[in-house]
Amino acid sequence: MFTGIVEEVGRIARIDQNGQNRRIVIEAANVTKELKTGDSCAVSGVCLTALDITATSFAADLAPETWERTSLSRIHPGAQVNLELPLAAHGRLGGHIVQGHVDGVGRLEAFERIADSDGFWLHVQVSPELERYLVFKGSIAIEGISLTVAKLEGLRCSVAIIPHTVECTNLGTLKPGDPVNIETDIVAKYLEKWTARDRQPGLSATALVAKGF
């Protein structure tokens, strides 16, 4: 489990392809100090398994499903990615519960400075399947970053970004039209399932009569 608090911005050093499978090599100086082979690491919100760890890099294998269904499909050598190690049992939940299981890909519409402010607006277009789980002031993970929904206008989700977040993540490298990983709040998904179950028809006199009782 992760919290959406980015620990380091890594750089894609290499992408090796073998058929439909890919292995990415990520340059990083800090998270590698704690990584062991087989450990999990969130890479721009995607939970991956660390391999071939050195003092300054680690590798991760991407299945075709991961490549096609996440924003990792746009990466290239030199691209920046957000890195986060799993939450330690004794650690603080600084952001919100993030699983590293991307629900879908949104499209960056704009990244613009807020008038008379040092902050920025991040506007992302999401699909109806994702929008149903978003609420005003609710949590959302974008590129693995724990953020708060500030505006919802149809399928356009907007969040306010402080300068520190821009400096410590890959957001400043993104361009309009770029895909971004979206993970919605897991609590919303559980609530939907529970309420759907409660709406299922139960035993009634009408149902018994219809069945011949």
Image (spheres, helix red, strand yellow):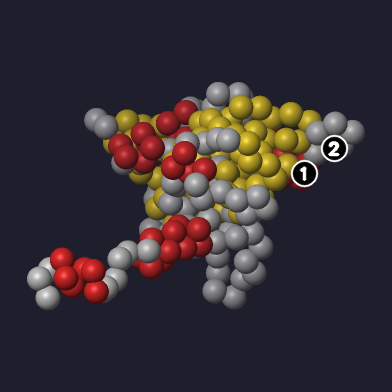
CA gap, disc 1 and disc 2: 7 Å
- Compared with 135, 1 (above or below) is below
Left or right, residue 8 beside residue 203: right
The answer to whether residue 43 of the structure is visible from this angle is no
Q: Nearer the viewer, residue 1 or 11?
A: 1
Q: Residue at x 40, y 45 (%)?
A: 60
Left or right, residue 11 beside residue 92: left
Left or right, residue 155 beside residue 64: right
**In the rendered picture of this protein, how many numbered marks are placed on residues?**
2
Amino acid type indicated by mark 2? Asp
Q: Which residue is mark 1?
A: 162
User: Badges 1 and 2: C-beta atoms under 8 Å apart?
Assistant: yes
Q: Residue at x 55, y 65 (%)?
A: 87
SS at circle 2: loop
> Image quadrant of residue 198?
bottom left
> Image quadrant of residue 96?
bottom right
Q: Position of residue 130 (x, y in %)?
A: 48, 44
- Compared with 155, 195 (above or below) is below
Residue 118 numbered tag: 2
Q: Residue at x 56, y 42 (%)?
A: 143
- Compared with 14, 160 (above or below) is below
Q: Nearer the viewer, residue 139 or 173?
A: 139
Q: Position of residue 80 (x, y in %)?
A: 58, 35
> Mark 1 packing: few (<14 Cα in 10 Å), some, or many (20+)?
some
Q: Earlier in the sequence, mark 1 or mark 2?
A: 2
> Mark 2 packing: few (<14 Cα in 10 Å), some, or many (20+)?
few
Q: Position of residue 165 (x, y in %)?
A: 72, 44
Residue 87 numbered tag: none
Q: Residue at x 18, y 72 (%)?
A: 208
Picture quarter with the C terminus: bottom left
Amino acid type indicated by mark 1? Ile
Q: Position of residue 146 (x, y in %)?
A: 62, 52
